[in-house]
Amino acid sequence: MNEERTYSISEFAERTGVSTDTLRYYEKIGLLASPTRGGGQKRMYDEEDIGRIRFLNHLRRTDMPLKKIRTPRYHRHGALPPFVQ
């Protein structure tokens, strides 16, 4: 069986360099899809989520405001997943 690796919010924050508060905020405003939940309803992230955050980090380093990142322009051509609206 090939089970996909998942990460708790603290492990995910450490791997991506994004604070747990920021991750929750990104989820709240729709930049990050609500992750699957593990035991005790804890957030569980996967490698695809890591890719999304890395891309968001690249956009943020260009000083692009979150409001602009959330526009359809950045997901229309597959740059961001369709849930980012």
Image (tube, rainbow, N blue to C red):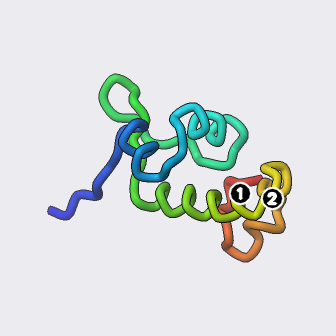
Q: Position of residue 40 (x, y in %)?
A: 34, 23
Q: Position of residue 46 (x, y in %)?
A: 40, 53
Q: Residue furthest left?
A: 1
Task: Name the residue: 20% across, 64% down.
Answer: 2
Q: Which residue is mark 1?
A: 60
Amino acid type, callout 1: Arg
Secondary structure of the residue carrying tag 1 is helix
Task: Name the residue: 41% across, 45% down.
Answer: 14
**Quadrant housing residue 70:** bottom right
Q: Position of residue 77 (x, y in %)?
A: 73, 76
Task: Name the residue: 77% across, 71% down.
Answer: 76
Amino acid type, callout 2: Met
Side of 61 relative to 46 (left or right):
right
Secondary structure of the residue carrying tag 2 is loop
Counting labels gives: 2
Q: Residue furthest top?
A: 40
Viewer-closest of 53 and 31: 53
Q: Which residue is mark 2?
A: 64
On the rendered image, what quadrant is the N terminus found in?
bottom left
Q: Do labels 1 and 2 touch, CB within 8 Å?
A: yes
Q: CA distance from mark 1 to mark 2?
A: 5 Å
Q: Position of residue 7 (x, y in %)?
A: 35, 45
Crowdedness near tag 1: few (<14), some (14–19) or many (≥20) residues, C-alpha within 10 Å: few
Q: Is 55 placed above or below 85 here?
A: below
Q: Residue furthest bottom?
A: 77
